[in-house]
Image: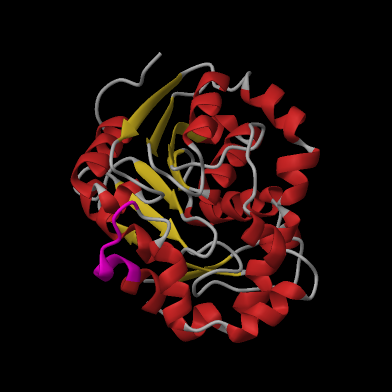
């Protein structure tokens, strides 16, 4: 599991941790808020026989550097661009989960020639209706999130995460919280999480119309995979987003919450493999 130092612009000198496996067309996996590269472990296993799979810890998360900066979608997209340049990847398919979907969309809008296909798993897509929960809005308040962060403990995190699954599997919940727990819950990590939660509001609220107009011009094949019982990103959001892309297909997963690639791993990861390295893209 190597690290790489980015070069250029505001991300110059930024250390990014990533996982790479397999051989073939390049596929990059982007985790959601609070996630990390290894949270894609089942998807990596499914794609690696047919692709070169890169899963990275986005800046501020996992083992990657956690600078004090403005964590907006454009910042993550610029870090992704520098990451691909550093590895010499000219074109890749992007697979994003939750907030990672928003990062993938932002990168595709700013560098469409570098993206072959776009897959959004329980994706949060800027430009379409999304109502942040009362708990999220509370945590995002200055001072409140910092105070609550000091009270956080693994059992509380696990209880909150389990609510994002339709039927939570203890091994999945334990792994998503326990993996690199100290690194991912330290002071720098908490600050980066809160900064992201606060800063991205500008993209989803203030620039909603701009994103929606730009997405309508994005001539890339897009696959959306969404759980019908997703409590974090509503089914309505997925339906609206799918209609907003010129070339999109939407696949529903019944009995599924916010983690389709974990809750229904064989089926969902099979769909992803066929989309990014298999059948022709939908039109």
Looking at the picture, tell me which residue is in the foreground, 276 or 203.
203
* In this view, 94 is above or below 3: above
Residue under the point 53% across and 16% down: 246
Residue 91 drawn at (x, y percent): 47, 38
* In this view, 44 is above or below 183: above
- Residue 13 in sight here: no
- Quarter of the figure with residue 186: bottom right
The quadrant of the image that shows the C terminus is top left
Residue 235 drawn at (x, y percent): 47, 34
From this viewpoint, which residue is outermost toward the front?
134
Check if residue 90 falls in the magenta segment.
Answer: no
* In this view, 185 is above or below 71: below
From this viewpoint, which residue is outermost toward the top?
283
Residue 165 drawn at (x, y percent): 36, 55
88 horizontally vs 111: left or right: left
Looking at the picture, tell me which residue is in the foreground, 103 or 212.
212
- Residue 28 in sight here: yes
Residue under the point 54% across and 21% down: 245
253 horizontally vs 221: left or right: left
Residue 259 drawn at (x, y percent): 37, 51
Looking at the picture, tell me which residue is in the foreground, 20 or 189.
189
60 horizontally vs 141: left or right: left
- Quarter of the figure with residue 237: top right
Q: Which residues are magenta?
A: 166-173
The quadrant of the image that shows the N terminus is bottom left
């Amino acid at each position: 599991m190597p690290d790489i130092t980015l070069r250029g612009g505001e991300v110059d000198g930024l250390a990014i941790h990533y996982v790479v496996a397999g051989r073939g067309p390049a596929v990059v996996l982007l985790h959601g808020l609070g996630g990390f590269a290894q949270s894609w472990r089942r998807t990596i296993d499914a794609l690696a026989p047919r692709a070169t799979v890169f899963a990275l810890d986005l800046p501020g998360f996992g083992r990657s550097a956690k600078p004090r900066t403005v964590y907006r979608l454009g910042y993550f997209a610029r870090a992704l661009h520098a990451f691909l340049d550093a590895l010499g990847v000219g074109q890749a398919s992007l697979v994003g989960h939750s907030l990672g979907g928003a990062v993938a969309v932002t990168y595709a809008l700013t560098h469409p020639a570098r993206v072959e296909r776009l897959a959004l798993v329980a994706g949060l897509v800027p430009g379409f209706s999304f109502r942040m929960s009362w708990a999220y809005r509370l945590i995002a308040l200055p001072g409140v999130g910092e105070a609550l962060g000091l009270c956080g403990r693994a059992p509380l995190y696990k209880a909150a995460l389990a609510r994002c699954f339709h039927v939570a599997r203890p091994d999945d919940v334990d792994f998503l919280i326990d993996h690199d727990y100290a690194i991912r819950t330290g002071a720098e990590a908490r600050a980066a999480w809160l900064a992201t939660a606060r800063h991205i509001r500008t993209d989803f609220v203030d620039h909603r119309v701009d994103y929606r107009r730009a997405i309508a011009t994005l001539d890339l094949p897009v696959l959306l995979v969404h759980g019908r019982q997703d409590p974090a990103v509503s089914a309505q959001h997925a339906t609206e987003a799918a209609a907003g892309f010129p070339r999109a297909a939407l696949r529903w997963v019944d009995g599924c919450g916010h983690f389709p690639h974990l809750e229904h791993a064989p089926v969902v990861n099979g769909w992803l493999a066929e989309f990014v390295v298999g059948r022709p893209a939908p039109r």
